[in-house]
Amino acid sequence: QVQLVESGGGLVQAGGSLSLSCAASTSILRIDVMGWYRQAPGKQRELVATITRGGNTNYADSAKGRFTISRDNAKNTLYLQMNSLKAEDTAVYYCKGSVTVWAYRVNDYWGQGTQVTVSS
């Protein structure tokens, strides 16, 4: 079982910056893919960015050029640096980790989420 805990959310003015952290209970070297997702009121949860164990990254179009995903293996922590925040970035942000147990089985783990509110 992998436990993920997000932190760093809060209230920020449009155009400002915020950095989110996700602390894992195990070595993140054991996690194949980690990512950030978000869910705004009345909307489906959507992908923001992902990073593989090998360091390959992928971003949603809305995040490209503004957000940066990274990981610190020594601290077992995933990060999301968010710059030039917009009101539409307001959502609960979730950390996700995907672990391959066997070739046919992948377990997904989710954090509890952290609220990000951008005021205009």
Image (spheres, rainbow, N blue to C red):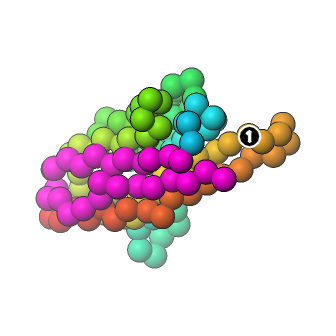
| Image coordinates for residue 100, horizontal then vertical, percent | 74, 40
Residue 9 is inside the magenta segment: yes
Horizontal relation, residue 44 to residue 101: left or right = left
> Between 4 and 104, which is closer to the camera in this rendering?
4
Residue at screen point 45% across, 55% down = 5
The quarter of the displayed image where residue 65 is located: top left
Write down the quadrant of residue 14 in the picture.
Answer: bottom left
Residue at left 64%, top 45%? 98
Q: Is residue 27 above or below residue 109?
A: above
Where does the magenta region start and end? 1-25
Q: Circle 1 — which element?
A: strand
Amino acid at dot 1: Thr
Q: Picture coordinates of residue 85 (x, y %)?
A: 23, 51
Q: Give the residue pinned by disc 1.
A: 100
**120 on left or right of 7:** left
The residue at the point 14 percent across, 59 percent down is: 13
Q: Main secondary structure of the magenta part?
A: strand
Image: 70 above or below 5? above
Residue neighbourhood size for the residue with mark 1, other residues' Cα within 10 Å, grouped as few (<14), some (14–19), many (≥20): some
Residue 12 image point, x, y percent: 17, 59
Q: Residue at x 15, y 50 (%)?
A: 15
